[in-house]
Image (cartoon, rainbow, N blue to C red):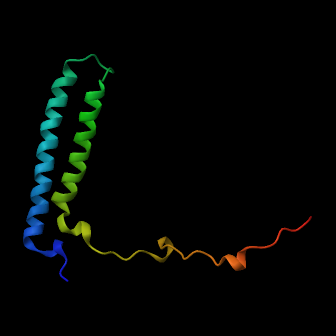
Amino acid sequence: MKKWHQSLSASLGLRGGGMVLLGSGGAVAVRLHQMALGVPAREPTSFMLLLAAIVFLCGSAGSALLFAGPALWEIVEVSERWRRMPPPDLAVTVRPDRDV
């Protein structure tokens, strides 16, 4: 089965989606800047905080899609140190309580 992200159309779509996210994040950032000029310093509203979160998410996801594209779904080998170990055998580790 061919992986969907290895096609040219998927690569162009992912990178185009990244550009759309960056553009919309930029538009929200401009609106946030206009709103910030109208309020006193250090008194952001909850709507301004929401806009800031949207700018951050659009910028992060958009740059990842634009610059990495289909490479986000590449399979990588995980080092032995960070692999999940199977659960220990409970019969070996469980000991009866001892009176001390």
Q: Which residue occupies the extreme right position in the image?
A: 100
Residue 73 x/y as whole percent: 25, 69
Residue 72, percent across and down?
A: 25, 66
In this image, 91 relative to 37: left or right?
right
- Residue drawn at x 30%, y 24% is 44
Residue 75 drawn above or below residue 69: below
**What is the number of callouts on the image?**
0
Q: Nearer the viewer, residue 88 or 14?
A: 88
Is 42 left, or right, of 90 in this rendering?
left
Task: Say which quarter of the image contains residue 10.
Answer: bottom left
> Which residue corresponds to the image point at 14% horizontal and 40% vertical from the top-left?
26
Q: Quadrant of the N terminus?
A: bottom left
User: Where's residue 19, x and y in %?
Assistant: 11, 52
Task: Specify whether 19 is left or right of 38.
Answer: left
Residue 7 appears left or right of 91: left
Determine which quarter of the picture holds residue 99: bottom right
Q: Nearer the viewer, residue 93 or 75?
A: 93
Q: Picture coordinates of residue 9 (x, y %)?
A: 7, 69
Write the residue at 19% across / 21% down. Answer: 37
Q: Quadrant of residue 47?
A: top left
The quadrant the C terminus occupies is bottom right
